[in-house]
Image: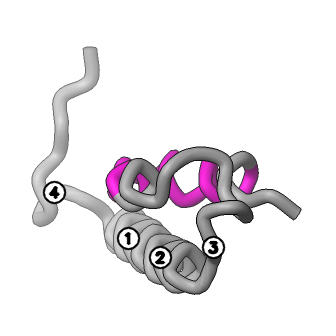
């Protein structure tokens, strides 16, 4: 099993990839929360409170919301 590296042991390109991933996850979560806030209960699959909780399960929560949570 590979040992986890600390931030100082990572290469500059790996650090950039980690930061970019974090930024993308944050943006997706904020966009999903804003979309969820503006939707009525009838335009969602499931209760709003559940989707709010699931959006913070990274990285699958926002992706699941956009794929399965909204009714068209």
Badge 3 is on which residue?
40
Q: Quadrant of residue 40?
A: bottom right
Q: Is residue 69 above or below residue 29?
A: above
10 Å neighbourhood of mark 1: few (<14), some, or many (≥20)? some
Q: Residue at x 47, y 76 (%)?
A: 33
Q: Quadrant of residue 30?
A: bottom left
The mark tally for this picture is 4
Residue at the extreme top: 1
SS at mark 4 in the image: helix
Badge nearest the viewer, 4 or 2 = 2
The residues colored magenta run: 53-67
Q: Which mark is residue 9?
A: 4
Q: Give the spatial CA distance, label 4 vs label 3.
A: 47 Å
* Label 3 or label 2, whichever comes before in sequence order: 2
Q: Give the spatial CA distance, label 1 vs label 3.
A: 29 Å
SS at mark 3 in the image: loop
* Label 4 or label 2, whichever comes before in sequence order: 4
């Amino acid at each position: 099993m590979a040992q986890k590296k600390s931030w100082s042991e990572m290469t500059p390109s790996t650090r950039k990839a980690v930061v970019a991933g974090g930024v993308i996850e944050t943006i997706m979560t904020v966009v999903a929360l804003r979309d969820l806030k503006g939707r009525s209960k009838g335009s969602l699959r499931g209760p709003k409170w559940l989707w709010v909780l699931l959006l913070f399960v990274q990285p699958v929560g926002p992706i699941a919301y956009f794929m399965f949570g909204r009714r068209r």
